[in-house]
Image: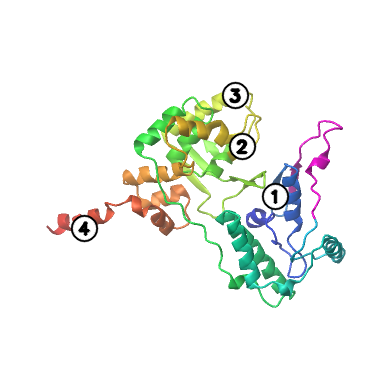
Amino acid sequence: MTAEVKRKIFEPFFTTKEVGKGTGMGLANVYGFVAQARGAITVESQVSSGTTLRFVLPTIAGPGDSATRFIRVAAPGTGTILLAEDDHHVRQLALLTLKTYGYTIKLPALRPMHIQTMLSALETDEIGARTRQYCYVILRRAFTIALKWQLVGRNPCLSVDRPKVAKRPVKPLTTEQAKTLLKESTANRFHAVYVLALTTGMRQGELFGLQWNDIDLKAATLQVRHSLEEIYGTLRLKEPKSDSGRRQLALPAMAVKALWDHKANQLTEGLASCPYVFPDTDGGLLRKCSFHRWSWSKIRSAAKLGDKVHFHDLRHSSASIMLADNVNIKAIQTILGHSTISMTMDTYAHLMPDAQRQAATSFDRLFG
């Protein structure tokens, strides 16, 4: 399969089949089952060669450790459910099961008011804006498919405003704060993570998805080819969303040294054959929550940055440092992997308060 298809295979309702021939829920359901069992899925695929999916599931220690602990018995309820299934027998079974639990299937009965009521109820229950937005997007996509299949006459989601996620203001670290952070992390297992975050502006997922074959320490270069994603507890490597996300970065000498030291530490940990640059202690993919617990929260506290400072702020700090040093804005866009230069300008324009004054005084120099 192509890289584009590979990125979307676990998305609900995504299918490469023609309209009416597939729901796009097969692999999405598999992904959900594996996630509920606290497992993981990796995908390897080459066009015209084939695809391999590997499933990793937790082992059962003994007879007393039954896998049934993962099974949740559904409670009876009432409500309207959107049912999409291309196999007649499976659809009938699902319909019968849902009716048994008290649910009804009435697609035309769902109106914009019902969707808005649901979103309002989620907000009342203090469900985050991002989660409410996901619920809206999935429901809208489901009705789009249903509309194509002529199961419904219209998509009621089109009459409901998509929940907005408030944009968090960019607050980079000062140069002194960045220096303190690096100093406090020197003895930490993940010191190289902080060095790369500040010197390359890489995202956390890109750092955790980094592999040793992406790095050429002798040439002092790094290729961003993957990003680590965690959905419902399941970890998977995904390719960048755009061509601009796939990029080569030049490494400063301090980053090269930090990586050499990090590689040496991996040898002492018995992880010489581990392909990941920043694995967990067992050589597997690193979870963000584990990194936060083992490293970030401690280093942040030691550097006296406060709980409101997020790891992503290191990426903003990298951009801020480059802007302060008059690095070309186009170069910064390329380094950060932004798809357009306007995205870079919109995000960091406020960090260039002297830009307009410099532009004005340039005329004095030329014509004064």
Front tag of 1 and 4: 4
Who is closer to the viewer here, 362 or 353? 353
Instruction: Look at the picture and state if 285 lies above or below 109.
Output: above
- Do tag 1 and tag 3 residues touch (Cβ < 8 Å)? no
At which x and y percent is residue 255? 45, 33
At which x and y percent is residue 99? 84, 64
Q: Is residue 55 magenta?
A: yes
- Do tag 4 and tag 3 residues touch (Cβ < 8 Å)? no
Q: Amino acid at mark 3?
A: Leu
Q: Which residue is mark 2?
A: 286
User: In the figure, residue 82 lies in which quadrant?
Assistant: bottom right
Q: Which residue is mark 3?
A: 267
Q: Which mark is residue 45?
A: 1
Who is closer to the viewer here, 190 or 69? 69
Q: Which mark is residue 360?
A: 4
Kind of element beneath mark 2: loop
Which residue lies at the image location 76% right of the left edge and 37% below the top edge?
58
User: In the figure, residue 367 lies in which quadrant?
Assistant: bottom left
Quarter placement of the N terminus: bottom right
Give whichever of discs 1 and 3 has the lower sequence position.
1
Q: Within 10 Å of the Cα at label 3, are there few (<14), some (14-19), or many (20+) other Cα atoms? A: few
Q: Within 10 Å of the Cα at label 1, are there few (<14), some (14-19), or many (20+) other Cα atoms? A: some
